[in-house]
Image (cartoon, grey):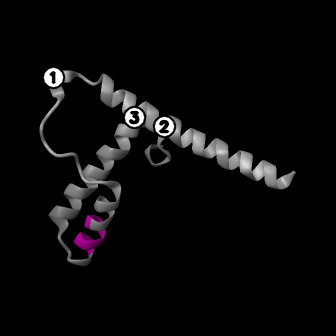
Amino acid sequence: MKKLDEQLAGIKKDQNAEQNKVQILEKIMIANPDKITTEPAPYSPEQLAEIETLSLRLKLEPIYEKNWGEQRALIESAGNKCPSYR
């Protein structure tokens, strides 16, 4: 029974994560079409983490600050559904 409870908890966690993705995608799809740009998508979360690591190691404060702003924008775009936003 304990194993089933663990599996159920994992499934619920996955479901919640997928619902968060759906909400983010809905916001993107409903967004004002006037704001659509041809600019490339922002960096992926993995790329942002790598930029942060390198900018700290190389002591590149302006790049670190810009990267931090991009990370913050990414988190804020997820809204209250993102644990990092709270």
Q: Residue at x 17, y 30 (%)?
A: 36
- Residue type at numbered disc 1: Asp
Residue 10: image location, x then y, percent: 66, 49
Q: Which residue is mark 1?
A: 34
Q: Are marks 3 and 2 in contact (CB under 8 Å)?
A: yes
- Residue type at numbered disc 2: Asn
Residue 12: image location, x then y, percent: 65, 42
Span colored in magenta = 51-56
Residue 74: image location, x then y, percent: 32, 45
Residue sitting farthest toward the right: 1
In the image, 82 versus 46, the foreground residue is 46
**In 3D space, how far apart are the residues under numbered discs 1 and 2 (Cα atoms)?**
25 Å
Residue 58: image location, x then y, percent: 20, 77
Q: Which residue is mark 3?
A: 24
**In 3D space, how far apart are the residues under numbered discs 3 and 1 (Cα atoms)?**
19 Å
Residue sitting farthest toward the left: 38
Q: Is residue 86 left or right of residue 31?
A: right
Q: Secondary structure at mark 1?
A: helix
Q: Residues within 10 Å of mark 3 (few under 14, many from 20)?
A: some
Q: Which residue is mark 2?
A: 20
In the image, which disc is placed on residue 25? none
